[in-house]
Image: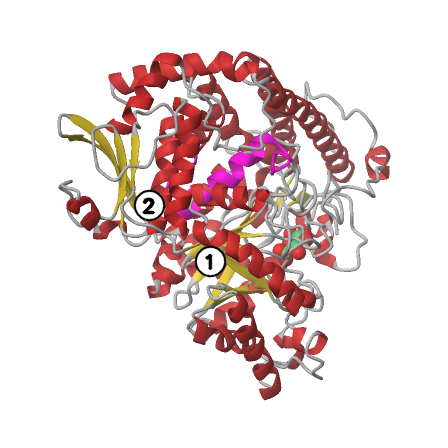
Amino acid sequence: MGLRLWRWAMMVALASAPLGAARADDGYDLWLRYRPVAAPARAALAAQARSLVIPGRSATLDAAAAELRRGLGGMAGVAPPAAATLAPGAILLARPAEARRLGVAVADAPELGREGFRLRGMAWRGGRITLVLANSDLGLLYGAFRLLERIEAGERPDRIDFATAPHLALRMLDHWDNLDGGVERGYAGHSIWDWWHLPDRADPRYTDYARANASIGINGTVLNNVNASAESLSPRYIAKAAALADIFRPYGIKVYLSARFSAPIELGGLKTADPLDPGVRAWWRAKADEIYRAIPDFGGFLVKANSEGQPGPQDYHRSHAEGAAALADAVRPHGGVILYRAFVYAHDNPEDRAKQAYDDFKPLDGRFADNVIVQVKNGPIDFQPREPFHPLFGAMLRTPLMMEVQITKEYLGFATHLVYLGPLFEEVLRSDTSGAGGPSVAQVLERGAGRPGLGGMAGVANIGDDRNWSGSIFDQANWFAFGRLAWDPEASSEAIAREWTAISFTPDPRFVTPVVAMMMGSREAAVNYMTPLGLAHQMATGHHYGPGPWVHDLARPEWNPTYYARADADGIGFDRTATGSNAIAQYAPDLARRLADPRTTPEALLLWFHHLPWSYRLADGETLWEGLVRHYDRGVASVAAMRRQWAALAPYVDPERFALTETYLAIQQREAQWWRDASIAYWRSVSHRPLPANVAPPAHDLDYYESLRFPYAPGHI
Ligand code: BDP
C-alpha cells in the first residue's frame, strides 16, 4: 500500500472504530456492511462517487447499480444518481467498446474472459473517474461488488488499479437441506429455503443470499441434500426451485438439484432404476425436459450413488460411469452437467476405507460422458481436520474433477469453535499431486482434464436461517474464503483473512493484525486438540460432537474411531504402507516413496500413514507418546490464547458480535480441554504409559468421558 493509500485507510479505520463499537450489529449484513466512513473521508468518497454511468441495461446491471447505490449511500452518505453523460467523479460500468464510445481510451480485455473484471481509477477531463470494465454484465456485477469491498477496506475508488478473472468455471455451494426444513450437518438453524411457502413467498433473504454469493463469485447452488428425497424432483418442488432460480438469475447463480438415483421407481412408478433400461433413460429425459421448461438455465444434477446406503448403478451391476451417463444424456440437450460424487465406500468391502473411492473410480477414468464432472472430497476419508489430498486428484487425468470441501464444520467443532478453514483449503489446493514438482491440486482443477469449463470447487454450505447466516461471526469467514478460493484456488488464505477482517469489522491494523494471526493459527489448534499427528475420525458416533476414540462396537468397522487409530499397547496409527493397506500406492511414485518411510512423511500426517510404537522418536527427540500429549496441550493453550486476544479487542468491535464470539470462545476452550482430557485418558489406558513430566492429568477418569451422551446435538439427521 502506498503512503497516501495507507493514510486514507487509517482515516477510515480510526473514525469507523468507535462508530462500529456504538452500533449493534447482529451479523446479518455479513461482509457487505457499508457502514459510514469518517466525516472527512466521507466527503471525499462522495466526491469520488458523484454519479453512476451504466450504458447497458439488464436485470444484472440493475442489481449492480442497486448495490453501488446501497454501498456508497451507506459509506459516503449519498447514493450516486444515475447519469447519462460521463463527468469527473463518475463510476462507469462498461464493456470496452461501450467505454470507448464514451471517449474513455481502453483496449479490449480478452484476458478478463466472460466473468473477470478490471477496476481502474483514471484521469478524466481534469478530474478522475472510476472504471469498472468487463466483457459481460455478470463481470460488471462482480466488479461492482469488489469495488465496494475495496472501498470498505479503506481504498480510494479513483486510485484503484486491480484486475482479476476466475480460474475455475464452477464455483458452487452444496446445501444439505431437507424438504422438512432440517439441514444435515447444519449448525446455523433451519434451512433458509422456506420450502413450504415457496413458490409464493419470496423471502427477501433469498436476494441477500444471492448478493452475498455474487460478491464472492459463487455461480451455482445445489438446493437440496445429497441424501436426496425423490420428492425434490416432483412438479410441486420443481416449481419451488424455479422460484429461487428466478431470484438468483440476475446474480449469475444457477440452480442445481441433488437427484436420487432411484427416483424413476419412487416418483415414476417404474420397476427399476437400472441406468441401461430404456424406460429409465426415457424417464430421466422427460424429467430433465420438465425441469428445463421451468428453469431454462438449470445447472444439472448432483448425484450421491452407492454411498452410505444410497441407491446407485451398482445395485444393477452397472458401473458409476454407466449410472452417470443415463442422467448426463438427459441434461445434455439443455447444456446441463452431472456432478457425480466419488464419495463411495461399501459395508461389504473389507478394504481400507481410504482406498475405496480410488479403487472404484480410477478404472473409469476417461469413460465418463462428456458432461460429467466427478466431484471428489478434499481427502480420501471424510472432511477430517487434516487429511492428505485425495489420490484421485493425481490419478484421473482424463476426467474433469471438482473438489468438494465442507464449509460447515461437522468435524471441526460445529459453529461454536473458531476455526478458519482457509489454511485447510489452501493446504489441499497447494498439494503437489506428483510429488515431483506438480501439478498441484489447484492446477488439476484449473485444467479440467483439457476442458477448463468443467473444473470447479463445491463447498458444503454452512448457511442456515440464523440471523447471522452461519451460526457464528467467524464462520462467515469460511463462506467468504471458500468463494475467494473457488475464484482463484492459488490465492493466499492469509490475504483472504485480512480482507475479510477489514471489511467485516474495521481496516484498523491494530485489529486486523491480531485477528488474522488468530484465524491463521486456529485450524492447527483444532487439529492439535482433536486429532494431532495425522489421526482421524476420533469424533463421537453419529452426531460427531466431541471425542469418542474408544468407540469400537458399531455395525460397520469403518464407523468406529478405533478402526482409524488402531491403538494398542504397542503403538498407534494406520499402516497404509506396503506392510499394511498399501494406500500409499494410490499416490504418484515419487510421493509414495516418501510416504513409505515415517522419516520422510510429514509429521502432521504421520499416523495417517504409519502404525508406530509409542517409543518412536519424533523429529524433536520426544517419543511419540510424549509428542502426542504435547500436541493436545498445545491445542488447548492456543484456544486460551485466542480467548485472551479476543478479550483485548473489545474496543474495536460492536458489542453484539463481540459478545457472541467471546461466548463461543469460552465454549471452545471448555470443549478443547474435554477433547484433550478424554483423548489422553483413553490413549493412556491402551498404552499403559505414565503421563510425561509436568503434564496435568485429565480432569475425570475414562469412564466419565465414555458415559457422556448428547442425543440432541445439532445437525444429526
Ligand atoms: C459425511 C456426513 C454425512 C454425509 C456424507 C456425505 O456425516 O452426513 O451424508 O458425509 O458427504 O461426512 O455424503
Q: Is residue 600 visible?
A: no
Which type of secondary structure does the marked residue at label 2 adopt?
helix
Q: Is residue 353 above or below residue 495?
A: below
Amino acid on which disc 1 is placed = Met
Amino acid on which disc 2 is placed = Leu
User: Which is nearer the eye, 453 or 24?
Assistant: 24
Does the stretch in magenta take in 171? Answer: no
Q: Residue most toward the front?
A: 84
Q: State the residue at coordinates (46%, 54%).
A: 249
Q: Is residue 517 visible?
A: yes
- The residue where tag 2 is placed is 140
- The residue where tag 1 is placed is 402
Q: Is residue 708 left or right of residue 288?
A: right
Q: Quadrant of residue 129?
A: top left
Magenta part of the chain = 467-493
User: Which is nearer the eye, 163 or 636?
Assistant: 163
Label 1 Cα crowd, 10 Å radius (few <14 / some 14-19 / many 20+): many
Q: How is the image coloured?
A: secondary structure
Tell which circle, 2 or 1, labels the residue nearer the N-terminal end.
Answer: 2
Q: State the residue at coordinates (85%, 33%).
A: 704
Q: Is residue 523 above or below residue 584?
A: above
In the rendered image, residue 628, in percent from the top left (x then y), is placed at 63, 33
Quadrant location of ligand 1? bottom right
Does the stretch in magenta take in 488? Answer: yes
Q: State the residue at coordinates (76%, 40%).
A: 686
Q: State the residue at coordinates (45%, 16%).
A: 16
In the rendered image, residue 356, in percent from the top left (x then y), is placed at 59, 64
